[in-house]
């Protein structure tokens, strides 16, 4: 009987030592090495925000400036908005220089590597001179834009990129004002810069 009690006591006393020999799972936050490295290499999200601006010219009498901000998904899809300002050098009417204000919204898709396809909607408030009474008025124009170009993405740095594209205006809301709005050619060259964060 004494022998049996001694064996049981020995087992009970050795039990903590035997349990220590078993593998114990360590919380993920305390792990180091390869698994921790894999965690840090994974991106926190598949999108990022950007701010920037561009300058536009239609090879004639218009110069446009636009600030922009937006979001880019998976480095492929971009959505953005921004205010727009245009300075017009007009050969028509009594005012040789006109100021136009508005806004725009756009979307872009990266097709192959650095090639991008651009579509957008623009609203602008144009001044024009009435031919009957000679007075200057302002006219709201809604236009759709389509373009193609390239984006340098991370060629400059991880967060700064430069892009350039040609923009066409296949439709705007009032053809009556063609002679002042898109003269001499409805194509704009656009160069811009973006900063991601």
Image (cartoon, rainbow, N blue to C red):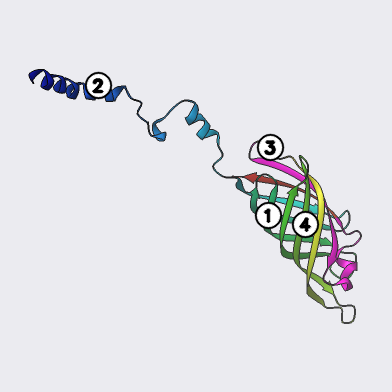
Mark 3 residue element = loop
Residue bearing mark 4: 119
Left or right of 16? Residue 92 is right
Q: Depth-wise, is mark 1 or mark 3 nearer the camera?
A: 1
Mark 4 residue element = strand
Residue 181 horizontal/vertical position (percent): 85, 65
Who's the residue at 81% across and 46% down the image? 149
Left or right of 92? Residue 8 is left
How far apart in space, not on screen, are marks 2 and 4 (Cα)? 70 Å
Residue 113 horizontal/vertical position (percent): 76, 39
Choose the circle earlier in sequence order: 2 or 4: 2
User: Does any portion of residue 96 appear in the rendered image?
Assistant: no
How far apart in space, not on screen, are marks 1 and 3 (Cα)? 18 Å
Choose the circle earlier in sequence order: 1 or 4: 1
Left or right of 165? Residue 160 is left
Residue bearing mark 3: 154
Choose the circle earlier in sequence order: 4 or 3: 4
Who's the residue at 55% across and 33% down the image? 41
Q: Are marks 1 and 4 in contact (CB under 8 Å)?
A: no
Residue 108 versus residue 15: which sits nearer the camera? 15
Who's the residue at 82% across and 49% down the image? 148
Rendering quarter of residue 184: bottom right
How far apart in space, not on screen, are marks 1 and 4 (Cα)? 10 Å
Mark 1 residue element = strand
Residue 172 horizontal/vertical position (percent): 83, 67
First to last magenta residue range: 158-187
Disc sitting over residue 79 in the figure:
1
How far apart in space, not on screen, are marks 4 and 3 (Cα)? 22 Å
Callout 1: few (<14), some (14-19), or many (20+) C-alpha neighbours within 10 Å? Answer: some
The answer to whether residue 113 is magenta is no
Disc sitting over residue 17 in the figure:
2
């Amino acid at each position: 009987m004494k022998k049996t009690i001694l064996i049981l006591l020995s087992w009970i006393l050795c039990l903590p030592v035997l349990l220590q020999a078993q593998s114990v799972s360590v919380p993920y936050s305390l792990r180091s090495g390869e698994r921790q490295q894999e965690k840090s290499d994974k991106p926190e999200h598949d999108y990022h925000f950007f701010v920037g601006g561009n300058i536009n010219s239609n090879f004639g009498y218009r110069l446009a400036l636009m600030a922009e901000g937006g979001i880019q998904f998976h480095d492929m899809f971009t959505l953005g908005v921004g205010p727009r300002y245009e300075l017009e050098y007009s050969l028509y009417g009594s005012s040789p220089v006109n100021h136009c204000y508005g806004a725009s919204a756009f979307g872009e898709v990266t097709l192959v590597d650095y090639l991008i396809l651009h579509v957008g909607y623009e609203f602008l408030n144009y001044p024009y001179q009435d031919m009957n009474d000679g007075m200057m008025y302002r006219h709201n124009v809604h236009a759709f834009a389509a373009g193609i170009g390239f984006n340098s993405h991370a060629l400059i740095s991880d967060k700064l990129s430069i892009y350039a594209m040609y923009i066409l205006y296949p439709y705007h809301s009032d053809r009556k004002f063609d002679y002042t709005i898109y003269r001499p050619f409805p194509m704009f060259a656009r160069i811009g810069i973006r900063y991601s964060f």
